[in-house]
Amino acid sequence: MPRFEPFRGLRYDTSHSTDLSRVSSPPYDVFNEATREEYAQKDAHNIVRIDYPLERDGAERYDLAARQLREWLEGRILIVDERPAFYIYRMTFTDETLTTRSTVGVLGALEVVDVGAGAVLPHEQTTPKAKTDRLDLTRATRVNLSPVWCLSLSSGLSTLLQEPATEVGRCVDEQGVLHVVERVEDPRRQAAINECVSQQPVLIADGHHRYAISRIYRDETVGTTSARGADMTLTYVAELVEEQLSIAAIHRLYSEVSFCDLSASLAEYFTLTDTGEVNASTLLDMRHKGALCLVDQHGHGTFLTPIAGKFTGVRDLDSARLEHALRITPHSVAYQHGVDDVLTALRSDRCAAAVLIRPVNIDQIRHVADSGELMPPKSTFFTPKLRTGLIMRPLDA
């Protein structure tokens, strides 16, 4: 079972009234370089100046990030807590049904284990992605700047985290999500959290690549002075229960195939029904009808209702059904969350068509954990996103 331990958190010194909404950011992989500049201009100490090195700075960009980190530590912009702690992370937000919700998880140091070890499980196949950026940044800074997101199969974790602890930071992000971080230093409470998480395997929900980077870094530093702290990585753990998760779909954008050919291929496996103009409410209609939705470049939609018997032996996932239906149709696929962003991509001619899919549910995720199967790539999009910069983990501390 996985080791999950307290650590000495690296964070902004809020004793100087630091506005954490101005110095924190979303995860580096959900925005582009232009947006990075917007965050950098918010504050001279925004975390993107370390977490998102600019390609225009060439090979030196990681050394520049590390130098910036050292300067902020020397100037006490950033501080390292004196004692190891777990950090409770609470989020309050409004979901797509306009319901106000609160979730809670805990930040700790999770053991880095080999593939197939069983303690830390992947939940979906990953797409090819350059690993050198995060690896080079870790080498230069020796800090876990943003966490892997894992789901605990142990019951009772949410209850253990309900009681408030010492607040060390809060902010409201651009989507109106309230993020609150609390430090747990009580040894008895730390022991209870440790025991609960370590009873069962954890399932990686978001951050497969970050975890893979941690494994590479651990292996390359074995027997060196850099090995300290490399056998663990910063991880947010939440209980795998409905009330602690908000899961959105990652929709499909299709190119290198005509809309007519794509529609014809899908018609062999789905009943096609006119949707009309697509908007955010289309997602609710899809849930009620048990359908996917094909969208053309004009934003016009067609419901795709699976035909009985056409998906025998195929997993009960929209992403798996699409892969099966299009397995012999030449095409290229990209991934996009958010209906508005999908429609923007269609209008900009980035793709010939899109298919909106429904989010997976808790039962489907738990089945993956129990069976050892993997979902197709980009099957889940967990929201809200954790804020980078609220709590980080220095490997040397």
Image: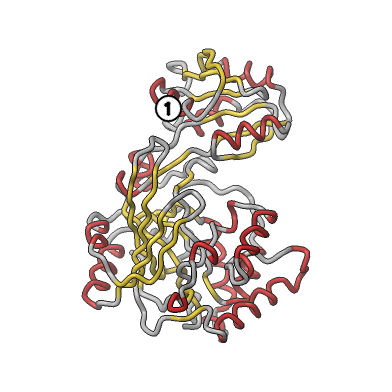
Q: Quadrant of residue 362?
A: top left
Q: Which residue is found at the position 56% from the left and 25% from the top?
A: 325
Where residue 216 appears, x then y in whole percent? 57, 68
Q: Which residue is found at the position 47% from the left and 20% from the top?
A: 306
Q: Which residue is found at the position 54% from the left and 60% from the top?
A: 25
Where residue 44 appears, x then y in whole percent? 62, 71
Relative height, residue 106 to residue 248 (above, below): below
Foreground of the two, 19 or 207: 19
Q: Which residue is found at the position 61% from the left and 29% from the top?
A: 354
Where residue 206 appears, x then y in whole percent? 48, 53
Foreground of the two, 148 or 85: 85
Q: Return the residue at label 1.
A: 284
Relative height, residue 126 to residue 59 (above, below): above
Q: Is residue 374 left or right of residue 131?
A: left
Query: What amino acid is at disc 1?
Result: Leu
Q: Is residue 8 left or right of residue 221?
A: left
Q: Is residue 56 left or right of residue 136?
A: right
Which quadrant is the N terminus positioned in? Answer: bottom left
The colour scheme used to paint the residues is secondary structure
